[in-house]
Image: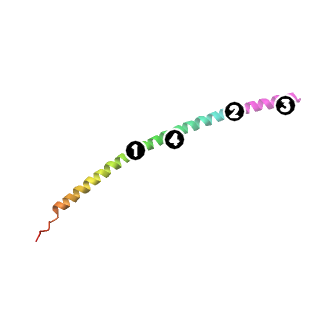
Amino acid sequence: MSDVIHMDIFFFIASVGFVVFTIFGIIVAVLVIKLLQKLNDIADDAKKVSDDMSDLSDELRLDVKEARSFVKGLFAFLKPKKKKK
């Protein structure tokens, strides 16, 4: 075979390989972009949940303080008072 035919075969195979690798790269890039979007959605959901938990813990802290002052007042009311001599 002549050198020209060898070059034509090489360039044909190289072109097909380049097209296949390009398509493969595009598919991988699309999958990575979808994965990053899902991870971003998960991070947003986690941030919303943590904000809700922060609000809930603030409310719970206030409820505990109110209950503590109520119990403290109840014990003060029920505690027998010392009589002065």
Magenta run includes residue 4 = yes
Residue 84 coordinates in the image, percent (x, y): 11, 69
- Which disc number belongs to residue 80? none
Residue 9 coordinates in the image, percent (x, y): 81, 30
Q: Is residue 49 left or right of residue 78?
A: right
Q: Main secondary structure of the magenta part?
A: helix
| Residue corresponding to mark 3 | 6
Magenta run includes residue 58 = no
Question: What amino acid type should be assigned to the residue bearing mark 2?
Answer: Val
Please report the bounds of the magenta region as a residue range: 1-18
Q: Nearer the viewer, residue 42 or 14?
A: 42
| Residue corresponding to mark 1 | 51
Dot 3, crowdedness within 10 Å: few (<14), some or many (≥20)?
few
When asked about the image quadrant of residue 15, the answer is: top right
Between the C-alphas of marks 1 and 3, the distance is 67 Å
Q: Is residue 20 above or below residue 58?
A: above
Residue lying at 86% horizontally and 28% vertically, measured from the top left: 4
